[in-house]
Image: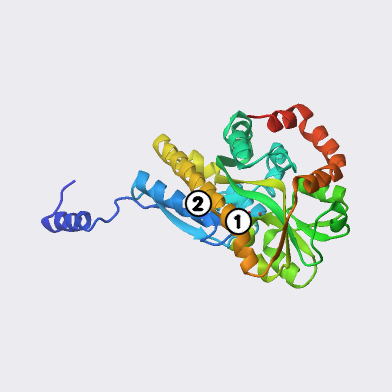
Amino acid sequence: MTFTIRGLAAIGALVAIGAPALAQTEIKIGYALAPDSHYGVAAQKFEEVLLAETGDQFSFTHFPSSGLGGEREVIEGLQLGTVEATIVSSGTLANFVPETGVFDIPFLFRDLDHARAVLDGPIGQEILARFDDVGLHGLAWGEQGFRHITNNRNAIETPADVEGLKIRTMENPVHLAAFNAMGAAPTPMAWPEVISSLQQGVIDGQENPLSVIVSVKLDEVQKYLTLSGHVYSPAMLLVSRPFWEGLSDDQKAAFEKAAAEAVTAMRGFVDDVETTGVATLKERGMQVNALSPEEKAKFQAAIASAYEGYYETYGQELVDSIVNFQ
Ligand code: PAF
């Protein structure tokens, strides 16, 4: 091939202004919460580290605040290859990899450290790897914190206080079974419908971790917050399997590094909000009560019948090995 002087000058000018030699691959990343939430912070960190590792090979477009729809729809988009990445709760994950439901069992984890150790350890990683069988690739487990109950009907101290409470649950059979066993009237619902349903009084309450309650200002539509900590809420950083398969080994390594740093940022954010969130919500006018260990034990006893179902579905050996994990 021959180059004219003018052609060489033009190439030189492009190099001088740093124009990319190749088109960038766009990563559309969707998540349910705002840019300043634990999801937003993790997505930003993911972008920052990935771009630092790979130069200008990728560009990011963020779709926060359910901009691509509910979590289930976004995950289906990943399977189809129309969306590249997402950060989601475990709400609908069991519809894709049923085994993930084991982590949604109430009163399974002692504290955040216990949950993180299990998810990062062999049990969590084995379940994460199963996403490859369903058109997805699980990069890492993240988290939201422990879920608590908010509602507009009454303060909750005993299982009798949730009797007949119209409470929104995630579209998650494990959570549904627990609230049914407690005697509540649970309504599974996709997240984008929750705020308007609370405003219209279609439901009395919902349950989510402090990270979510603070971020979406649930205090504007809910009066009572009960620090029940009834269940840990994992999250996951997922990419589309068709997209993942198109990456080189070096790119895959960069994605893994970026995901690990994103999770560290997400967990750090959750640690902060677990410390400051209650004071923030009290200042904003919520009436807050914390369940004592004795009160919690009554809720645990109230869902004993649901535990029989969990053992049947997941095997008592697996549940016990998570409970006893050190
Ligand atoms: O309650 C839920 O559905 C989830 O916790 C949320 C708020 C969508 C975050 O993933």
* 205 vs 125: above or below: below
Q: Do labels 2 and 1 touch, CB within 8 Å?
A: no
Q: Position of residue 111 (x, y in %)?
A: 64, 41
- What kind of element bears circle 2? helix
Left or right: where 278 falls relative to 204: left
Mark positioned earlier in the residue sequence (2 or 1)? 2
Query: Dot 1: within a 10 Å radius of its alpha carbon, few (fewer than 14), some, or many (20 or more) residues?
Result: many
**Quadrant of the picture in which ligand 1 is shown:** bottom right
Q: Position of residue 76 (x, y in %)?
A: 63, 50
Which quadrant is home to the C terminus?
top right
Name the front one of labels 2 and 1: 1
Tell me if residue 69 can be seen.
Answer: no
Q: CA distance from mark 2 to mark 1?
A: 13 Å
Q: Residue at x 81, y 33 (%)?
A: 311
In-front residue for pair 168/232: 232
Q: Identify the image quadrant of residue 10.
A: bottom left
- Residue at disc 1, CB closer than 8 Å to ligand 1: no
Tell me if residue 88 can be seen.
Answer: yes
In-front residue for pair 254/18: 254
- What kind of element bears circle 1? helix
Q: Position of residue 277 (x, y in %)?
A: 60, 58
Q: Residue at x 74, y 41 (%)?
A: 105
* Residue at which label 2 appears: 42
Q: Identify the image quadrant of residue 31.
A: bottom right
Q: Identify the image quadrant of residue 34.
A: bottom right
Query: Dot 2: within a 10 Å radius of its alpha carbon, few (fewer than 14), some, or many (20 or more) residues?
Result: many
Q: Position of residue 250 (x, y in %)?
A: 39, 36
**Amino acid carrying mark 1 in the image:** Ser
**Amino acid carrying mark 2 in the image:** Ala
* Residue at which label 1 appears: 211
Q: Residue at x 64, y 34 (%)?
A: 127
